[in-house]
Image: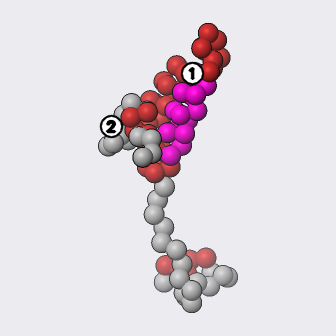
């Protein structure tokens, strides 16, 4: 089973983009290897986990669903707004 990115970022599943950003910044500062010179290996590992969790979670929240164009659509390359007709 995969990692629970929301748990890694210490936020709920209904977290907003702002909540994700705030939590990521806090945890990234806490686990940055330069901030933990005595335990660099664990800090590096946690920093990578937090970064991955943020990337995946933020992309899930921030991506808008745009349906793909179908073959043979009425899209006219010379008229960019023809898709709305």
SS majority, magenta: helix
Residue 8, how many percent across, how many down? 43, 33
Q: Which residue is mark 2?
A: 12
Q: Which residue is mark 1?
A: 42
Answer above or below: position of 83 versus 46: below
Tell me, yes or no, whether the highlighted magenta stretch contains residue 1: no
The span from disc 2 to disc 1 (Cα, nearest Å) is 24 Å
Lower sequence index among marks 2 and 1: 2
- Write the start and end of the magenta stretch as one range: 42-56
Q: Residue at x 50, y 49 (%)?
A: 59
Please name the residue shown 38% across and 34% down the image.
7
What's the coloring here? secondary structure
The image quadrant of residue 36 is top right
Where does the image place residue 26, in percent across and percent down from the top left?
48, 24
- Give the farthest residue toward the front: 1
Picture residue at 38% right of the left edge, 41% below the top: 16
Camera-side mark, 2 or 1: 1
């Amino acid at each position: 089973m995969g990692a629970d990115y929301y748990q890694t970022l210490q936020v709920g599943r209904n977290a907003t983009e702002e909540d994700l950003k705030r939590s990521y910044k806090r945890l990234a500062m806490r686990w940055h290897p330069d901030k933990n010179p005595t335990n660099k290996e664990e800090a590096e590992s946690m920093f990578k986990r937090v970064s991955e969790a943020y990337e995946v979670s933020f992309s899930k929240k921030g991506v808008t669903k745009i349906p793909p164009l179908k073959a043979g659509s009425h899209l006219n390359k010379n008229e960019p707004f023809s898709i709305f007709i």
